[in-house]
Image: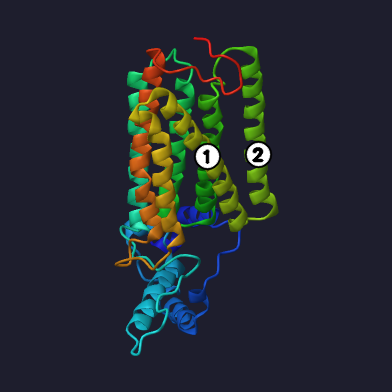
Amino acid sequence: MRFRRSQAWQAAAAICLLGGVARASLGDRLPDFKECIKVCEEANCGDEPSPIPFHRRVLFWDCPSECDYTCQHVVTDKRLARDPPYMQPVYQFHGKWPFYRFMGMQEPFSVIFSLFNFLAHDWGMGQIRERIPASYSLRKYYMMFGYFGLASWTFSILFHTRDFNVTEKLDYFAAGASVLYGLYMAPIRIFRLDKKDASRQSLLRLWTALCVLLYTLHVLYLSLWSWDYTYNMAANVAAGVVQNILWSGFSFVQYKKVGRTWAMWPGLIVAWLIMAMSLELLDFPPWMGMIDAHSLWHLGTVGPTIWWYNFLLRDAQEDLAGNLPETDFGLGSRKD
């Protein structure tokens, strides 16, 4: 069946393209790019369109998107070959660098590194299941941390495979949920809100309700009011900074009490993540057309994720063995 007659593919593609305004970039406005698109579509997207390989059709590449991809690289190659060279030869198109795709994936290394993060969470959850008893009160929170991580990196894989409006929103909402859950979990472990005394349980209910409300408002604002990239970034950074401060302070206090190197791990993990996050500030055209700062940021989070699960395991095992000092932090004595 010819691609242009496949109504099922067309319907699915239409769903993926619903809503929103595409991000504009300098590359989109280049006259050469606009002319290339026009010529390509006239030559290839008429009544007898050029055939598209099956593996790309599966990922909803159609004739206009094929022309868009081809023209990005035609224009970029032309600008790179100019003598004398341009001060900025490589421009972004639709908010993204002109990546070379692989098997239909728009950003192959971001997909691969997102998969590494998914596997890191999957490994960590397996360790928690095997090495922490189900009766341990913090275990369910650690498992939920893993599930949020799996969801976040699944949608990251989908988004970097094909950038549609719906995959972008799912990626952003899942990432926001994962970051907020990390913030939610921090006080539960640090202040031991999992304990069954009345004051802690009351605080836990309030904290849970507040986090659910904040996430709901966050999604509603982005969905119904304004799809604001600056706000979304600020909200995630704020949630990340607060939990980083909490874990760094906890790490310092625990190390002073325990005197063991593993108690410092949360603070060291935070430092690693801050350094990895700096890659997002060093945005540069993709090396060899495939590896950019964003993909390296994804690679940089794999190690801390594995390290973090090792900390959760060690902390839980020491707690179960009764080797941790009391941590009342102003909420009353801990009672085991």
Residue reaching furthest bottom? Answer: 84
Q: In x, y percent, where is residue 224? A: 69, 50
Instruction: Using residue 239 as the reference point, say whether residue 36 is left or right of it.
Output: left
Q: In x, y percent, where is residue 122? A: 35, 33
Above or below, 123 relative to 68: above
Residue pointed to by mark 2:
214
Q: Label 2 amino acid?
A: Leu
Q: How is the image coloured?
A: rainbow
Residue pointed to by mark 1:
245
Q: In x, y percent, where is residue 174? A: 51, 43
Distance from the alpha carbon under mark 1 to that under mark 2: 20 Å
- The numbered mark, 1 or 2, whose residue comes first in the sequence reads 2
**Circle 2: element type:** helix
Q: Based on the displayed image, in which of its 4 quarters is residue 176 positioned?
A: top right
Residue reaching furthest left? Answer: 288
Say which of 46 and 56 sits in front.
Answer: 56
- Of the 4 image quadrants, the one containing the N terminus is bottom left
Question: Which residue is found at the position 62% from the left and 39% from the top?
Answer: 215
Q: Label 1 amino acid?
A: Ile
**Circle 1: element type:** helix
Question: Which residue is found at the position 37% from the left and 61% from the top?
Answer: 292
Above or below, 110 relative to 209: below
Instruction: Using residue 317 as the reference point, say whether residue 163 is left or right of it.
Output: right
Question: Which residue is found at the position 33% from the left and 19% from the top?
Answer: 131
